[in-house]
Structures are given as structure tokens and as C-alpha cells.
Image (cartoon, grey):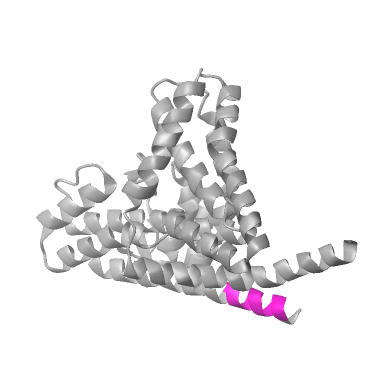
Amino acid sequence: MVGPLRNDTRRKRRFSAPMSLLSLIAVFLIEQLQPLNYRRVVEGPLQAWADFIEARFDAGEYRHGAIAWCLAVMAPVLMVVLVHGFLHSLSPLLAWLLNVGILYLTMGFRQFSHHYSAIQVALRLGDLPRARQLLGEWLGHPADGMGSQEIARQSILAAMAASHRHVFGVIVCFVLLPGPSGAVLYRMAEIVQARWKRQNTAMENNFSTFSRQVFGIIDWLPLRATASAFAIVGDFEDAVYCWRTQAGQSGERELGIVIASGAGALGVQLGTPAAEGVEVAGGVELGIGDPADADFMQSAVGLVWRATVLWMLLLFLLGLASLVG
């Protein structure tokens, strides 16, 4: 019995990296053909789920938050693990289709690229009122009175944060954990901590503390992987310099790692990092070089795509190594 089980485990490991790569490629293609209304299909229902759990467990205590987080996040993750294992026992193709479906729901460029591209076009046409309107709709707060450079700066900040939250963070967790459980864990944990943090700030209780702590642990490696990818595909020396000297000065230190590295890789000066579209107050300049403008917006698009290609190349090499091994 030990021999067949060991061989089965080796086969799963051998095909995990190639299947992960094929899943990501399929999701990128599907997303281009049929963009997902993320806020209506994913974000809205998950926020409602987080509110449902919070309403029944929030007594202001740390332990209540820990229990609620396990139910809100780990229960769906474990369910996905069981379903994926069952489908894989029937057919690897069914398990792969589940991977694609869940990745389609939990990640994607279209969650931010549509707004970003529209703002970029408006700036190039000199239509500042339209650019302010689009930016305000994207970030969820007014952009009245902003000039072209400030609009470009805010857009690049938000795009870098969103590329991590909606692309690279999900990819790292998807690759590291079995099946699509990593993607579900990252997306659920990110939405739950953001939702509970936002609602508990005014009440000053400890219910949301556990969710923030756990997401910090989950996101520790993905943040550094995203920052490293930006540095590798951009100006490496400036990216590392900004990462080491500027990230710790921002109000949102962890997200500042990604923003500082990305700004250094682009050679652009940016402000404090944006978390969920809200700029951190009282921060410092991040990045080095010229002030942001519409041209840098295009450069930021290239940086994100090069980082994506880098990830695809790494997965290809891992898959090739596993097949050869």
C-alpha cells in the first residue's frame, strides 16, 4: 500500500506545476473574452457573508474574532479542498476545471485595468473632468480639483496595489497550497479583514484584530514576491533602494513594500501607498525620479505585464523541472 500511495503522491507533484500554469493561462484568456463583474459577483456576496458572520459573533473580544474568522474563511477553504480532492479522484480534468473556475472568480486584471485604461485615455485627451470622474468612481471618493499629475499618481498607486491584491497575491497562494485552496484563502482572508477592520474602527473593539493579524501572515510572502518581481523586471537598483529606505516610512508599511519597489522600478515619484483605494495620510514620498504623469501610467502597465510574464516563466520552469525529475 505504501508504494502505490507514494507513486500517486509523486504523480500529483509532477503535474501540479504544469496544471497551475495551464490554469492561469486559461483564466487570463477567459478574462479577456468575458470580463467578470467582480464587485457584483464576488465582492458583494463575500462582504455579505463577512457581515453575516460578524453580526452573530461580534462581542468585541479577540477570541470571538478568532472563532468567527475560522468559520468565515477556513470553512469555505476546507470545503474547496474536499471538493477538489473528490473531483481529482474522478478525473484530473474535473479538478483542473475547478481550478480555472475559482481562479476566474478570485483574480484578474480586469478588476482594475478597465478603470485605469479609461483614466489614461482621458488624460491623454486632456479631458480632466472625465479623468476625475473615472478616478472617483474607481477609488470610491471624490477626485475634485486634482490636476493631471495627481490623477496619474493616484492611478498608478491604486493600480500597483490592485495588481498585488488581484493578481500576484492570489498567484503566490494558489501555487503554494493544494488545488485552488490558496486562491480561496487569500481572497476570503483579504475581504474579511478589510470588511471587519472598516466596520470595527469606529467601535474600537478587538473583534477584527485576529483577522488582520492572520492576513498579515498570509500576505507576508506574497507582498515580498510582488515587490521582488517588480524589481527584477524594472530598475533593480532603484527598486531595492526604495524598498529598503522608504517602505518602512509609510503608514501602511506592508503595502508600502510593493509601492516603493514598483515606484523605484519605474523611476517615478509617488506618494504614500493606497489600501483599498484610500491613500494613507501623513506619509512620505515613495519612489525616485520624475513626478508621475500619463506616460508613466503606460510604463506601469508594462511593469505589471512583465512581472506577470516572469511568473509564467517561473511556473513553466518549475513544471519542466518536475516533469524531468
On the image, the x and y values in percent for residue 202 come to 38, 23
Identify the residue at horizontal 37%, vertical 72% (top origin).
Answer: 302
Instruction: Say left or right for 249 vs 224.
Output: left
On the image, the x and y values in percent for residue 181 come to 59, 52
On the image, the x and y values in percent for residue 112 come to 33, 58
Which quadrant would the N terminus be assigned to in this image?
bottom right
Q: Quadrant of residue 131?
A: bottom left
> What's drawn in magenta, residue-wise?
314-323
On the image, the x and y values in percent for residue 105 come to 43, 55
Q: Identify the residue at the far right of this view.
A: 2
Viewer-closest of 242 and 275 = 275
Rendered position, 200 above or below 11: above
Q: Is any part of residue 177 visible from this angle? A: no
Rendered position, 208 above or below 188: above
Q: Quadrant of residue 291?
A: bottom left
Rendered position, 294 above or below 46: below
Q: Identify the residue at the far front of this view.
A: 90
Viewer-closest of 237 and 177 = 177
Identify the residue at horizontal 48%, vertical 29% (top origin).
Answer: 53
Rendered position, 105 above or below 21: above
Which quadrant would the C terminus be assigned to in this image?
bottom right
Viewer-closest of 19 and 274 = 19
Q: Main secondary structure of the magenta part?
A: helix
Asked whether 5 falls inside the magenta stretch, the response is no
Identify the residue at horizontal 52%, vertical 23% (top origin).
Answer: 206
